[in-house]
Image (cartoon, rainbow, N blue to C red):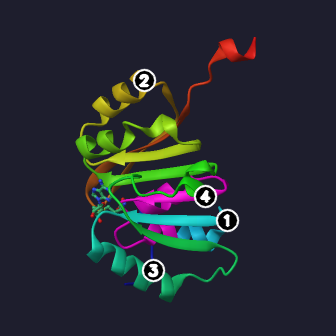
Amino acid sequence: MSFKLSKRLNKIVEMCDTVDTIIDVGTDHGKVAISIANKGLSKKVIAIDNKEGPLQSCEKNAKLFINNDNVEFKTLLSDGLNNLTVEDKKNELGIIITGIGYDNMKNILESINDYNFKYLILSPHTKIVELIKYLENINIEIVQQETLYDDEKYYYILKAKKKMCLINHL
Ligand SMILES: C[S@@+](CC[C@H](N)C(=O)[O-])C[C@H]1O[C@@H](n2cnc3c(N)ncnc32)[C@H](O)[C@@H]1O
């Protein structure tokens, strides 16, 4: 694999800011997770996939391309966030879920408010309008929205955060 990021993957990385742990769900080749580790955006990076094949290719790429010894890089076989350890769950998280369909993404997001996340980066292959409505229903607000044309397709990438409950601040 060459380590050049596409315009879309580059934008995903660019939208992440510094946080304790960044999790890339559906990591596949691991390019986003590896690039985040190299940039030192978090102390720990967890690359998740629900299939062995993609995880093995991510591990191979991590060995070849990670050049930052200060970051802990971990791969995890998991359907969404299900197999995350209690310890990892407690950390402040940035969670990336991109390149999968909306229905699959919605299943992963069902328990998202149980996690201590600072931001989500979301880009489904399908049904962006449904995703926006769903986020509103679960009290998550979109703070950045990017549309880009890459590889002959339009992509939508959202950055979202937990809505602030004003009543707690009175
Ligand atoms: C098309 S690739 C996307 C890779 C990268 N995230 C991107 O945006 O280009 C989708 C990856 O998500 C994985 N995947 C699909 N559903 C998943 C789930 N529920 N939990 C974890 N990984 C999943 C697939 O195995 C595959 O490797």
* Residue range highlighted in magenta: 8-33
Q: Is residue 87 rendered magenta in the image?
A: no
Residue 15 in sight in this render: no
Label 1, label 2: how many angstroms apart (C-alpha)? 30 Å
The Cα–Cα distance between marks 4 and 1, rounded to whole angstroms, is: 6 Å
The image's mark for residue 43 is 1
Q: Earlier in the sequence, mark 2 or mark 4?
A: 4
Q: CA distance from mark 2 to mark 3?
A: 36 Å
Q: Residues within 10 Å of mark 2 (few under 14, many from 20)?
A: some
Q: Which residue position holds label 2?
A: 136
Q: Judge whether 29 appears above or below 128 on screen.
A: below
Question: Which numbered disc flags the more N-terminal residue, 4 or 1?
Answer: 4
Looking at the rendered structure, the kind of residue marked 1 is: Lys
The front one of 154 and 128 is 128
Q: Position of residue 20 (x, y in %)?
A: 66, 56
Q: Are marks 4 and 1 in contact (CB under 8 Å)?
A: yes
Above or below, 124 relative to 40: above
> Which badge, 1 or 2, comes first in the chain's sequence?
1
**Residue bearing the label numbered 3:** 3
